Image: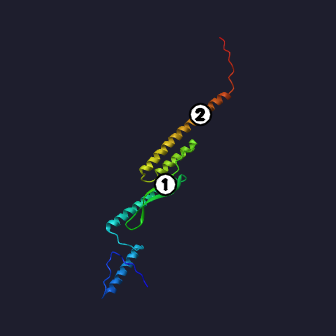
Amino acid sequence: MEITALDPTRTAPPRGRGGERAAGQAQEEVRSGLQAAAGDRVELSQTEKARVADLKATDAAVKAHEAAHMAAGSGLVKGGASYGYTQGPDGKRYATSGEVSIDTSVPEDPQEALSKARRIRAAALAPADPSAQDRQVAAQASRMEAEAGRRLAQERAARSASGAYQAAAASPRPPDLDITA
């Protein structure tokens, strides 16, 4: 015994002469509809084809953008890229947004902080078309770099002053001169 699901929106096949043929046609239409739902190609309208082409281009651009961040941010990237998807009229999902998390914590050592800030800025600005968020991260990295530079300069000045004081304290005292006129 074969059970065939019929589309409830269709009318029942006519009874009587030719009824079997009409029922057979209905079953074939249901089968072809199920095949289309199972992955066979469905013809898209021109508008839908244009939408799919736009989504494909966006998908490629988003993935290239995030790949640039990941390549430039090697060692700073936390995990991989995450994407937001949009389903196209063809039933496929296309990346339409993306994000790469980067470690922006500030190291205690000013020299390490300076180096890390430069790497963060390079990773943020790596794509050919940095987003507003990318520019904000780059600006944050520039502030981090400036602060690390100030801390480094202060440490060097303190070491230099300390070294000069220690050198003066360690040098022998000049002999007392007795000047009489």
The quarter of the displayed image where residue 24 is located: bottom left
Count neighbours of disc 2 (C-alpha within 10 A) and say few if under 14, some if 14 to 19, many if 20 or more. few
Query: Mark 1 falls on what kind of element?
Result: strand
Could you tell me which residue is drawn at 53 percent across and 40 percent down?
A: 149
Q: Which residue is the extreme one toward the bottom?
A: 17
Left or right position of 157 against 24: right
Query: Mark 2 falls on what kind of element?
Result: helix
The quarter of the displayed image where residue 61 is located: bottom left
Give the mark nearer the N terminus: 2 vs 1. 1
Residue 170 in the image: above or below residue 39: above
Kind of residue at badge 2: Ala
Could you tell me which residue is drawn at 66 percent across and 28 percent down?
A: 169
Could you tell me which residue is drawn at 45 percent across and 56 percent down?
A: 98
Kind of residue at badge 1: Val
Could you tell me which residue is drawn at 58 percent across and 36 percent down?
A: 156
State the quadrant of the C terminus.
top right
Left or right position of 157 against 52: right
Q: How many marks?
A: 2
Q: Which residue is the extreme one toward the top?
A: 181
**Disc marking residue 158:** 2
Rendering coords of residue 18 (x, y %): 31, 87
**Disc marking residue 111:** none
**Label 2 close to label 1 by CB (< 8 Å):** no
Rendering coords of residue 129 (x, y %): 42, 53
Front residue of 111/164: it is 111
**Disc marking residue 100:** 1
Front residue of 6/129: it is 6
Q: CA distance from mark 2 to mark 1?
A: 39 Å
State the quadrant of the N terminus.
bottom left
